[in-house]
Image (cartoon, rainbow, N blue to C red):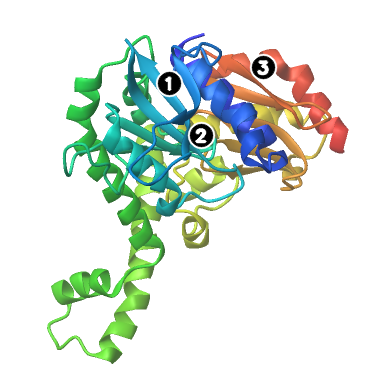
Amino acid sequence: MSFAERLAALATKIENQADAIGTEEATKNAFVMPFISSILGYDVFDPLEVVPEFNADVGTKKGEKVDYAIVRDGEVQILIECKASLGELQLEHASQLFRYFAVTNARIAALTNGVVWQFYTDLDAPNRMDSKPFLVLDLRDVDDMLVPELQKLSKESFDLESIINAAEELKYLGALKREIAKQFHEPSDEWIRFFTTRVYEGSFTQRVREQFTTLVVKASKQFLTESVNDRLKAALGTGTTSEDVRALASEPIVENDLARDTEIETTLEELEGYQIVKAIACAEVKPQRVAQRDQKSYFAVLLDDNNRKPIARLHFNGRQKYLGLLDESKTETRHPLDSLEQIYEHTDAIREAVLRYA
């Protein structure tokens, strides 16, 4: 499999098993070691490549260990600290990484709960780990733009100089994207003031702030709605109306949907794939029972708009597209698609999924 395919396979495993993994040791065995092995390409059973419970005593701190050290040419290159998969990562979890980073030759450190990986280096001061990661990988929602950068950390393509050179741009680009998304969800006073003073000539009083808080939020949602509709209209051709776009999506693109998650972007291919799955499913049930719900990591086709009744999942966010089909135990198998027409090759499995819930 290619690097991207191996990453997609691990992401599927994590999606299916994350809720069942409750301890740090289980996280290491189920998620972290497979990541080191299948994604980064290092032999987790070779102590010359991967050192578990790495010990490098620092000053008066004795006996502390970092969970894994990855070694290349006899030198420690990457330090990895793990936390349980159900917990959120906090900077205080990286205290050992900070100390060990300064006394080894490692230029890369990773803090992970097996699902989210935060990669750090020393951009701000030499041999001193930064307080903010330069790359954040969420395996529940893999950013396709980060895949080539992640591959540079693999054994086959390890390129420290290239990683460090790209790290500063990645660090601030990622931080900016997260901050913009945050402002669309919960705008700060500075964000409200920034837009208000460009359209309102009076004083920025408390009453004005309260009035424009509502207006800025509403304008942001309407802007996103119109942008999505315009892109779909352009893809469908001239003469397409907003009603045509909404009919294709089988449910309105409205402000409340965008308020739910402004990071979700429904594409034309997802809607076309949904229509194919719906056409197959309608051999067993009435069309109005087949619904769609776009998520951050996949586009779900559901029976009765019920998450417990998944018909199929469309994984169209990466370069390789997949049709996800779930068996009786809700275990998903991803089938690669070179074209949307290949969905028809899985007609029997889609109809069986519908009958399972109907």
Q: CA distance from mark 1 to mark 2?
A: 16 Å
> Which mark is in front, 1 or 2?
2
Q: Classify mark 1: helix, strand or loop.
A: loop
- Answer with left or right where residue 348 lies relative to residue 334: right
- Sequence-first tag of 2 and 3: 2
Residue at 24% x, 21% y is 160
Residue at the disc numbered 1 = 319
Residue at the disc numbered 3 = 344
What amino acid type is highlighted by mark number 3? Tyr
Residue at the disc numbered 2 = 139
What amino acid type is highlighted by mark number 1? Arg
Residue 70: image location, x then y, percent: 41, 21
> Which mark is in front, 1 or 3?
1
Q: CA distance from mark 2 to mark 3?
A: 28 Å
- Near mark 3 (Cα within 10 A), the count class, few <14, some 14-19 or many ≥20, is some
- Sequence-first tag of 1 and 3: 1
Write down the quadrant of residue 97 in the picture.
top left
Q: Is residue 297 above or below residue 315?
A: below
**Residue 117 appears in view:** no
